[in-house]
Image (cartoon, coloured by chain):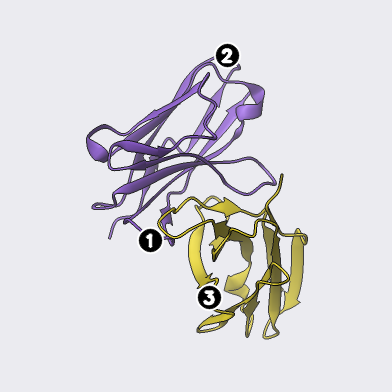
Amino acid sequence: DQQVKQNSPSLSVQEGRISILNCDYTNSMFDYFLWYKKYPAEGPTFLISISSIKDKNEDGRFTVFLNKSAKHLSLHIVPSQPGDSAVYFCAASVQRGNEKLTFGTGTRLTIIP
Amino acid sequence: EAGVAQSPRYKIIEKRQSVAFWCNPISGHATLYWYQQILGQGPKLLIQFQNNGVVDDSQLPKDRFSAERLKGVDSTLKIQPAKLEDSAVYLCASSSIGNYGYTFGSGTRLTVV
Protein backbone atom coordinates (compact mmCIF):
# COMPACT_ATOMS: atom_id res chain seq x y z
CA ASP A 1 0.00 0.00 0.00
CA GLN A 2 1.85 3.03 -1.33
CA GLN A 3 0.62 5.93 0.79
CA VAL A 4 2.91 8.47 -0.89
CA LYS A 5 3.11 8.36 -4.66
CA GLN A 6 5.36 10.03 -7.16
CA ASN A 7 3.95 8.99 -10.50
CA SER A 8 6.69 10.44 -12.68
CA PRO A 9 9.85 8.34 -12.41
CA SER A 10 11.81 10.89 -14.41
CA LEU A 11 11.66 14.46 -15.65
CA SER A 12 13.92 16.44 -17.99
CA VAL A 13 13.94 20.24 -17.93
CA GLN A 14 15.96 22.85 -19.80
CA GLU A 15 18.37 24.88 -17.70
CA GLY A 16 16.79 28.16 -16.58
CA ARG A 17 13.23 26.86 -16.89
CA ILE A 18 10.87 25.82 -14.11
CA SER A 19 10.97 22.24 -12.78
CA ILE A 20 7.73 20.95 -11.24
CA LEU A 21 7.79 17.70 -9.30
CA ASN A 22 4.53 16.21 -8.11
CA CYS A 23 3.51 14.02 -5.20
CA ASP A 24 0.16 12.53 -4.16
CA TYR A 25 -0.78 10.94 -0.87
CA THR A 26 -3.66 8.83 0.33
CA ASN A 27 -3.44 9.01 4.13
CA SER A 28 -5.53 11.95 5.34
CA MET A 29 -3.72 11.78 8.69
CA PHE A 30 -0.49 13.08 7.13
CA ASP A 31 0.06 16.61 8.35
CA TYR A 32 3.69 17.39 7.58
CA PHE A 33 5.42 17.02 4.24
CA LEU A 34 9.03 17.19 3.15
CA TRP A 35 11.15 17.01 0.04
CA TYR A 36 14.54 15.35 -0.01
CA LYS A 37 17.17 15.47 -2.74
CA LYS A 38 19.53 12.57 -3.40
CA TYR A 39 22.73 12.42 -5.44
CA PRO A 40 24.22 9.04 -6.45
CA ALA A 41 26.14 7.24 -3.69
CA GLU A 42 24.97 9.78 -1.09
CA GLY A 43 22.18 9.79 1.44
CA PRO A 44 19.09 11.97 0.89
CA THR A 45 19.43 15.57 2.03
CA PHE A 46 16.56 17.62 3.41
CA LEU A 47 15.40 20.33 1.02
CA ILE A 48 12.18 21.98 2.16
CA SER A 49 9.07 21.17 4.19
CA ILE A 50 5.51 22.32 4.70
CA SER A 51 2.98 21.93 7.47
CA SER A 52 -0.65 21.11 6.69
CA ILE A 53 -1.74 24.47 8.10
CA LYS A 54 -0.02 26.20 5.16
CA ASP A 55 -0.50 25.96 1.43
CA LYS A 56 2.87 27.34 0.35
CA ASN A 57 6.41 27.51 1.64
CA GLU A 58 9.29 29.18 -0.15
CA ASP A 59 13.05 28.94 0.27
CA GLY A 60 15.13 30.64 -2.39
CA ARG A 61 14.61 28.89 -5.72
CA PHE A 62 12.47 26.18 -4.11
CA THR A 63 8.75 26.46 -3.39
CA VAL A 64 6.47 23.72 -2.12
CA PHE A 65 2.71 23.92 -2.63
CA LEU A 66 0.19 21.85 -0.70
CA ASN A 67 -3.40 21.18 -1.80
CA LYS A 68 -4.95 19.28 1.11
CA SER A 69 -8.33 18.75 -0.53
CA ALA A 70 -6.64 17.07 -3.49
CA LYS A 71 -4.03 15.35 -1.28
CA HIS A 72 -1.39 16.71 -3.60
CA LEU A 73 1.84 18.60 -3.20
CA SER A 74 4.36 19.90 -5.66
CA LEU A 75 7.91 21.21 -5.62
CA HIS A 76 8.80 24.07 -7.94
CA ILE A 77 12.40 24.90 -8.76
CA VAL A 78 12.96 28.23 -10.50
CA PRO A 79 15.26 28.70 -12.29
CA SER A 80 16.53 25.15 -12.74
CA GLN A 81 20.29 24.69 -12.62
CA PRO A 82 22.50 21.74 -13.67
CA GLY A 83 23.32 21.04 -9.99
CA ASP A 84 19.63 20.35 -9.43
CA SER A 85 19.96 17.09 -11.36
CA ALA A 86 19.22 14.43 -8.72
CA VAL A 87 16.50 12.12 -7.45
CA TYR A 88 13.82 13.94 -5.45
CA PHE A 89 11.79 12.16 -2.78
CA CYS A 90 8.55 13.37 -1.30
CA ALA A 91 7.94 12.29 2.32
CA ALA A 92 5.12 12.66 4.83
CA SER A 93 4.56 12.30 8.55
CA VAL A 94 1.37 11.44 10.45
CA GLN A 95 1.66 13.72 13.43
CA ARG A 96 3.87 16.23 15.07
CA GLY A 97 6.22 14.62 17.53
CA ASN A 98 6.36 11.45 15.48
CA GLU A 99 9.24 11.86 13.12
CA LYS A 100 8.63 8.64 11.21
CA LEU A 101 8.54 9.48 7.52
CA THR A 102 6.80 7.65 4.69
CA PHE A 103 8.63 8.21 1.42
CA GLY A 104 7.51 8.18 -2.20
CA THR A 105 9.42 6.27 -4.87
CA GLY A 106 11.29 9.30 -6.16
CA THR A 107 11.54 11.33 -9.38
CA ARG A 108 14.83 11.58 -11.24
CA LEU A 109 15.24 15.18 -12.42
CA THR A 110 17.69 15.89 -15.23
CA ILE A 111 18.52 19.49 -16.09
CA ILE A 112 19.62 19.89 -19.69
CA PRO A 113 22.27 22.60 -20.21
CA GLU B 1 29.48 19.66 12.13
CA ALA B 2 30.46 16.13 11.20
CA GLY B 3 27.76 14.18 9.37
CA VAL B 4 26.28 10.77 10.01
CA ALA B 5 28.98 8.13 9.55
CA GLN B 6 28.17 4.67 8.24
CA SER B 7 30.33 1.65 7.51
CA PRO B 8 30.98 -0.33 5.48
CA ARG B 9 30.01 1.47 2.25
CA TYR B 10 29.55 -1.77 0.32
CA LYS B 11 29.06 -5.39 1.30
CA ILE B 12 28.52 -8.52 -0.76
CA ILE B 13 27.50 -11.71 1.04
CA GLU B 14 25.97 -15.03 0.17
CA LYS B 15 22.42 -15.84 1.21
CA ARG B 16 22.11 -17.32 4.68
CA GLN B 17 25.24 -15.49 5.85
CA SER B 18 25.09 -12.77 8.49
CA VAL B 19 26.09 -9.13 8.17
CA ALA B 20 26.29 -6.08 10.42
CA PHE B 21 26.21 -2.37 9.68
CA TRP B 22 27.44 0.43 11.91
CA CYS B 23 26.22 4.00 12.32
CA ASN B 24 27.60 6.95 14.25
CA PRO B 25 25.04 9.78 14.37
CA ILE B 26 25.64 13.50 14.64
CA SER B 27 26.81 14.41 18.12
CA GLY B 28 23.92 15.37 20.37
CA HIS B 29 21.21 13.91 18.14
CA ALA B 30 18.91 11.88 20.38
CA THR B 31 16.93 10.21 17.60
CA LEU B 32 18.44 7.63 15.26
CA TYR B 33 16.78 5.82 12.37
CA TRP B 34 17.57 2.89 10.13
CA TYR B 35 15.92 2.93 6.72
CA GLN B 36 16.01 0.30 3.96
CA GLN B 37 15.95 1.50 0.35
CA ILE B 38 15.36 -1.17 -2.24
CA LEU B 39 16.26 -0.24 -5.82
CA GLY B 40 13.47 1.80 -7.43
CA GLN B 41 11.67 2.42 -4.14
CA GLY B 42 11.72 5.11 -1.51
CA PRO B 43 13.40 4.58 1.86
CA LYS B 44 11.36 2.54 4.32
CA LEU B 45 11.77 2.91 8.08
CA LEU B 46 13.04 -0.22 9.81
CA ILE B 47 13.59 1.08 13.34
CA GLN B 48 13.65 4.36 15.25
CA PHE B 49 15.56 4.92 18.49
CA GLN B 50 15.28 7.80 20.91
CA ASN B 51 18.41 7.78 23.02
CA ASN B 52 18.86 4.03 23.60
CA GLY B 53 15.16 3.13 23.60
CA VAL B 54 13.17 1.80 20.64
CA VAL B 55 10.34 4.12 19.53
CA ASP B 56 9.14 2.20 16.47
CA ASP B 57 10.24 -1.15 15.08
CA SER B 58 6.93 -2.18 13.53
CA GLN B 59 8.46 -2.73 10.08
CA LEU B 60 11.59 -4.54 11.24
CA PRO B 61 11.57 -8.24 10.22
CA LYS B 62 12.45 -9.40 13.70
CA ASP B 63 13.00 -13.02 12.73
CA ARG B 64 16.19 -12.00 10.92
CA PHE B 65 16.91 -8.34 11.66
CA SER B 66 18.10 -6.89 14.95
CA ALA B 67 19.36 -3.47 15.98
CA GLU B 68 20.77 -1.91 19.07
CA ARG B 69 21.92 1.49 20.20
CA LEU B 70 24.08 1.09 23.24
CA LYS B 71 24.64 4.17 25.42
CA GLY B 72 22.36 6.18 23.14
CA VAL B 73 25.08 6.95 20.60
CA ASP B 74 26.36 4.45 17.99
CA SER B 75 24.05 1.86 16.52
CA THR B 76 24.43 -1.46 14.76
CA LEU B 77 21.95 -3.21 12.47
CA LYS B 78 22.36 -6.94 11.93
CA ILE B 79 20.83 -9.36 9.46
CA GLN B 80 21.04 -13.08 10.21
CA PRO B 81 20.49 -15.01 8.01
CA ALA B 82 20.38 -12.82 4.92
CA LYS B 83 17.98 -13.43 2.03
CA LEU B 84 18.24 -12.34 -1.59
CA GLU B 85 15.46 -9.79 -1.04
CA ASP B 86 17.56 -8.02 1.60
CA SER B 87 19.70 -6.56 -1.18
CA ALA B 88 19.26 -2.81 -0.67
CA VAL B 89 20.91 0.34 0.59
CA TYR B 90 20.69 0.65 4.37
CA LEU B 91 20.53 4.26 5.44
CA CYS B 92 21.12 5.60 8.91
CA ALA B 93 19.80 9.02 9.88
CA SER B 94 19.76 11.12 13.02
CA SER B 95 17.92 14.18 14.30
CA SER B 96 17.34 16.24 17.38
CA ILE B 97 13.99 15.53 19.01
CA GLY B 98 11.04 16.96 17.08
CA ASN B 99 13.12 17.83 14.02
CA TYR B 100 11.84 16.32 10.78
CA GLY B 101 14.67 17.49 8.54
CA TYR B 102 16.98 14.81 9.71
CA THR B 103 20.44 14.04 8.33
CA PHE B 104 21.16 10.84 6.47
CA GLY B 105 24.44 9.03 6.15
CA SER B 106 25.72 7.86 2.77
CA GLY B 107 24.38 4.37 3.35
CA THR B 108 25.65 0.81 3.07
CA ARG B 109 24.89 -0.97 -0.18
CA LEU B 110 24.25 -4.65 0.54
CA THR B 111 24.20 -7.24 -2.20
CA VAL B 112 23.08 -10.75 -1.30
CA VAL B 113 24.01 -13.39 -3.89
The answer to which image quadrant residue A25 occupies is bottom right
Label 2 crowd (10 A; few <14 / some 14-19 / many >=20): some
- Identify the subunit bearing mark 3: A
Q: Is residue B100 left or right of residue B12?
A: left
Q: Which of disc 2 and disc 1 is earlier in sequence?
A: 2
Instruction: Depth check: give the residue in front, A97 or A49.
Output: A97
Say which mark, if any, is on residue A110: none
Q: Which element is circle 2 on?
A: loop
Query: Percent from the top left, x then y, of residue B9?
Result: 46, 39
The chain under label 1 reads B
Front tag of 3 and 1:
3
Question: How many angstroms separate mark 3 from mark 1 (CA)?
Answer: 17 Å
Q: Residue B74 in the image: x percent, y percent?
A: 29, 38
Please tell me whether mark 1 sits on a helix, a strand or a loop.
Answer: loop
User: Between tags 2 and 3, which lies in front?
Assistant: 3
Could you tell me which quadrant the N terminus of chain A lies in?
top right
Quick one: which chain is yellow? A
Q: Residue at x 50, y 68 (%)?
A: A47
For disc 3, the marked residue is: A53
